[in-house]
Image: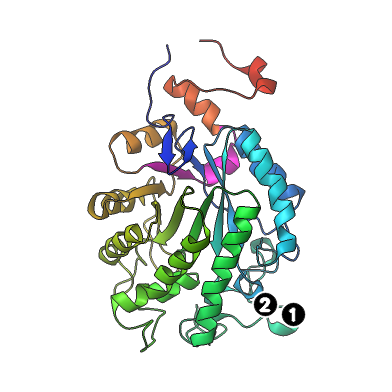
Amino acid sequence: MERTTALFSHLNLRSVELKNRIVVSPMCMYSSEDGFSNDWHLVHLGTRAVGGAGLVITEATAVSPEGRISPDDLGLWKDEQIEGLKRITKFLKEQGSVPGIQLAHAGRKASTTSPWKGYDELREEEGGWKPVAPSAVSFKEGGCVPEALNGAGIQKVISDFKMSAERALKAGFQVVEIHAAHGYLLHEFLSPLSNLRNDEYGETLENRCRLLLEVVKAVREVWPTEFPLFVRISATDWVEGGWNETEAVYLAGLLKKYEVDLVDCSSGGLVPYAEIPVEKGYQVGFAEKIKREAGIKTGAVGLITESQQAEEILQQGKADLIFMARELLRNPYFPMEAAEALGADFSWPPQYERAKKIR
């Protein structure tokens, strides 16, 4: 007998309806050339939509060439990149999934080789570029020292996010997520470990939040009011004296006022020496705290691998969405199997119906 489940309940975000609470979390594929999407992205993202995820979010998509982590990153800094993404969003919608895109700038963690190429710093003479950051502080000891952004550079970052959001709309996306986590540029401005500025973008908590809020405001100016806007944050740096949960709650409250609909709650990534207690569901508490104290919808992410685990997170009110990454790499058909395990009503693609178990 089919029963009502939290994981397979619908969620309305502005005019967008998600058919379930399972989200394909942004995962870098390092498979682009000059930022363009290709058949890999279509098949990778399309398979997760066929598998039944309610929302499918692209990997971190660079808003500028210098905002890429590596030369192999997906991008949306020029109009020519729209068409390939439009092909992907069309297919995702045909499968009943909502297409989302994560817009990002890597900051001081830019200009590296892809993980399977060594994940090393890529020097300019090797085809790399000079990273930018809030302050001239390298990510790791002995690493490349980034260029501190001046006023014009900051305005360019804001403009780049805004123009990329405009292109995302033309490409057919219905959700935009701004990446302000994992030690990338907007997170670097938030944390006192990487932001040593003494101007209006540094020192105080209010000032350190300023750039992210200006980016959100600029994106909201071009992103339709009927479409939701997410922000991914690292709720803590996991380092004493760094960005912390209390500051994350404060920021989430501001984001709500700036018409952000959901905070995607991750953590870490700012410094290589952080000691992170990675275990099953280790970041769920951040989503719960921010949801409760800031009064904003949240997404939980981080070693959520089982249907009952995801169901309980939602039933207990700890989050509104379940973002899944590695588990959906291992098994793009997790939603189908989870529905079976939980006894939930779930429509398979008609092409696959013959394989559906009969209860």
Bin the neighbour count of mark 2 within 10 Å (Cα to Cα): few under 14, some 14-19, many 20 and up. some
**Image-based side of 33 in relation to 312, left or right:** right
Check disc 2 and give the amino acid type.
Leu
**Image-based side of 22 in relation to 38, left or right:** left
Query: Which residue is rendered at x = 66% and y = 72% of the image?
Result: 65
Whole-percent x, y for residue 176 in the image: 52, 54
Does residue 200 lie above or below 115 as drawn?
A: below
Whole-percent x, y for residue 73 in the image: 66, 63
Does residue 255 lie above or below 40 as drawn?
A: below
Tell whether position 284 is magenta.
no
Query: Which residue is rendered at x = 71% and y = 42% of the image?
Result: 43
The residue lying toward the viewer, choosing from 105 and 335, is 105
The residue lying toward the viewer, choosing from 239 and 41, is 41
Tell me the tag on residue 122: 2
What's the magenta region? 320-333
The N terminus - image quarter: top left
Does residue 238 lie above or below 17 as drawn?
A: below
The residue lying toward the viewer, choosing from 21 and 240, is 21
Whole-percent x, y for residue 132 in the image: 55, 81
Check disc 1 and give the amino acid type.
Glu
Query: Which residue is rendered at x = 35% and y = 61% of the image?
Result: 255
What residue is disc 1 on?
Answer: 126
Measure how far apart labels 1 and 2 are at the Cα level: 6 Å
Tell whether position 321 is magenta.
yes
